[in-house]
Structure formats: structure tokens, C-alpha cells
Image (spheres, helix red, strand yellow):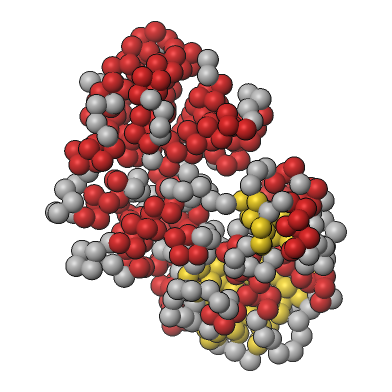
Amino acid sequence: MDASRRAAYEVVHAVTTRDAYANLLLSAVLQEHALAGRDAAFATELAYGTLRRQGALDLVLARCSKRAFERIDDDLTDVLRLGAYQLLHTRVPAHAAVSTTVDLAGAVCRRGKASAGFVNAVLRCVSRRSWQEWVDEVAPQEKEDPLGHLAVRLAHPRWIAEAFATVLGEDPDSGFGETARAMAADNAPAAVTLVARPGLVERDVLATEAGGTPGALSPLAVRISGDPVRLAAVRDRRAGVQDEGSQLVTLALANAPLDGSDSRWLDMCAGPGGKAALLGSLAAQRGSSVLALERASHRARLVRRATAGLPVEVRTADATRPTHEAAFDRVLLDAPCTGLGALRRRPEARWRRQPEDLDALTALQARLLARALQEVRPGGLVAYVTCSPHRDETVALVDALLSDCPVPVEQVDARPLLPGLPAIGGGPHVQLWPHRHDTDGMFLALLQHGS
């Protein structure tokens, strides 16, 4: 049995049947199968690529299956997805993709040889057309529904394509060129980026140690290839893995001008700890301290590990409830969200999230933001951050709060705090995009409690 394909199957199957997270599971599976180098890269590509394009692959497989697709056993379904991905999106020769997937079915599927025969028949059907030819058959007609056609071609649920087009201001009359670029960026692997934590390691020193290159946007960023866990600077917490967009919004809050006291900061939804560690290293240089809240106990443990040795107190607590502390000078609210800005890092998220999730998430975001404005002192600053460009989670939510807020508050123009960044919008908020900035799709609104 091909170890790379077996490892990819185990990741995909765990995600689809147990709601596992591919980015958290992959490393352990690769180690279990003793995969490294090209074999590990191939397994990663198969697993992540199959999960990213799952919904679109299912449309093709349904056309090639004589059984109702939704009634096929889940183990067999995942094997078929892996085979279809190889046929339609890799350079693996068709005969090799079919034969190795048939072998995989015989090894992992409950029905053994019967499953292998079914896989052979379905994948031979899939192999008769290219991906674009299949898109023309299974997607809405491009002339009649250009966005629906694009959503299938670039493997996004229709509602996410619509959300991107709305924020980018595109419609059928203008065309969906930038929407297409935004979705295409979600299908490309994200670079591994480190943050050099201030006071613990200089960015250029970290770049030399890690064999990486300085990031283009954040003054603390270093981009590397390979596994960051192997690096001493990561193991001893002088550096951490953190997207440049995440670094930028954290630095924007920390560097925003503030009159009066500046000694007490709050991170309201701190897990898994990247932003809390960056705030903690900055606070240590300024004689300040950070209170980090995280509701989930296992994530709170991650925050404690990330911030060890820094002036950060970590509490396992619900951030919608009062802290019963004196008011804070700076508050970071990185709110739970759909994560539509990080689809390139979380391959399964686009199919796991549903538009119905927005109601509960935006209600929670509104409660958290209202609490943040009650925790900050008059004249203090709140950074409202999401890793999503969806209007309901970003601009619309902030506008609703500003129009009906129990405390005096005004929005501060955040753009000067991210100098040199192109195409961040007309303000006062900032929206980052993978296709524009090669960062996660972070949104930042900076709010000041009226004094």
C-alpha cells in the first residue's frame, strides 16, 4: 500500500467523519507513516487538495456513479474523492491514479474487493474528461450564471462566492475578476510565517537562524519553508508561527496613539495564543501587563504555553461576562467567526461552514464587542478583529454597534497604523485579503471609548 495515499486518506476520512481539523492532524499522521520530503509533500497535497475541492469533486463523482452518491459508504466516498482529485488536479498519470486508488479501496474500505471494482468503474468515467470539461457539464452555464459557474470551477460554496463578490463590489455587469482571484488564492497553500517576538529575538537574527526571508508587510515577520517545530527559536518561544495579517492587526492596536495610562491590556478571546504572546512581548518592553481570557480549557492551556515567561495572566473564562477588573487601556477582541479569510489554511472549512452559522456568530460577536467597550476605560482603544471579510461579521456589525451603542464610542481610522499596505479599502476600517496581500483575510476596526 502506497504510504502517502494511505496517510492522505486517513486525514481526509478523519475530517469528514469525525470533524477533525486537517492542519492539526496532518503532522501526526505523517510521522506515524514515517513520511518525509517528497512523500510527505505528496500526502499533504492529496489531503489538502481533496478537502479544498470536496464539494466540486462530489458533483463529478455523482455523475459517474450508478449509485445515489449520498448513499455510498463514507469510507468509499473519501477514497473516490482522493482518486478524482488526482485525475483532475494533479500530474499523476490516469492509469496510476486509478490503479493506486483501487488498491487503496481494497485496503481501507469495509467491502473490500467489491469496493475496489466500483472505484475502478467510477474513476475510469472521471478520467474521460478534463476538469474544465467536467465544469462545463456539472456547473451552471457561465452565460446564465457566471458566479455559480465560477464557484464550481474554483471549488467554493455558492454563498461564499456571493459574500466575496459583495465585499469586493462586483456583479454580473462588472464581472467577477477579483472575486475569481480571491477564490483562487484560497486554493493555493499559504506560506509558513514566523513572528519575531520583540525583546526576545530580532527579526533579521530570526531570519538567519531559520534560513528564511523577512516578510514583506510586518516588521516582525519571517517566511520559511519546512516544519517550524524544528527551529530552536520556536521551541523556546522567542518566535512563533503567526500569519503576517495577524501580526499587523495586533501591532496596530499596540501602536495606536493613546493618551493617559497604558499599563493594562486585555485579550478577550486569546486561544490559541499567538496574539496574546505578541501583546505580551510588547507589554514586557513597556512595563505593561496583559490579561488573556479563553473559554475553552484546552485552548487556555495553549495560551499559557505560548505566553510563558511574559507578563500575561491567562484565565479560563467567558469573555461575554465581566472581568470584575479595573478598566483596561487597550482591548483586543479577535472574535470567533466563520474563518472565511483563512480558507487557504483550513481546507475543510469552506464545506463545513454554512450560511446559517452567521446568525449565531454575529450575535456572539455583538455581545463580545459590547462587553469590550464596557471593559475599556474612557479614552481607551478596542480592536475588533475577525478572520473573515463577510459584511455581516465586519462592517455591518460595527456600523450597527455605532448606531446603537450604550457608551460613547467613535471609530478611529486604522489605515495609518498599517503604513505602506496597498488596497486596504477606503477606511476607517482595514480589510486584508490573501489575493491582495498574501495574508489571511483579516478585518480590523479600531474603536475608541469616548472620554
Residue at the spot 24% in from the left edge and 26% down from the top edge: 128
Q: Residue furthest top?
A: 113
Where 441 falls versus 7 (above or below)? below
The answer to whether residue 386 is seen in the rendering is no
Percent position (x, y) of residue 145? Answer: 18, 54
Where 262 falls versus 132 (above or below)? below
The answer to whether residue 434 is seen in the rendering is yes
Q: Quadrant of residue 261?
A: bottom right
Q: Nearer the viewer, residue 336 or 274?
A: 274
Percent position (x, y) of residue 435? Answer: 44, 60
Q: Quadrant of residue 368?
A: bottom right
Percent position (x, y) of residue 83? Answer: 39, 26
Q: Is residue 356 left or right of residue 444?
A: left
The quadrant the C terminus occupies is bottom right
Q: Quadrant of residue 98?
A: top left
Q: Nearer the viewer, residue 314 or 217?
A: 217
Number of marks in the image? 0
Percent position (x, y) of residue 117? Answer: 33, 11
Residue at the spot 38% in from the left edge and 25% down from the top edge: 93
Residue at the spot 60% in from the left edge and 58% down from the top edge: 243
Where 336 falls versus 76 (above or below)? below
Q: Is residue 401 left or right of residue 260?
A: left
Q: Nearer the viewer, residue 135 or 163?
A: 135
Q: Nearer the viewer, residue 226 or 118?
A: 226
Residue at the spot 79% in from the left edge and 78% down from the top edge: 263
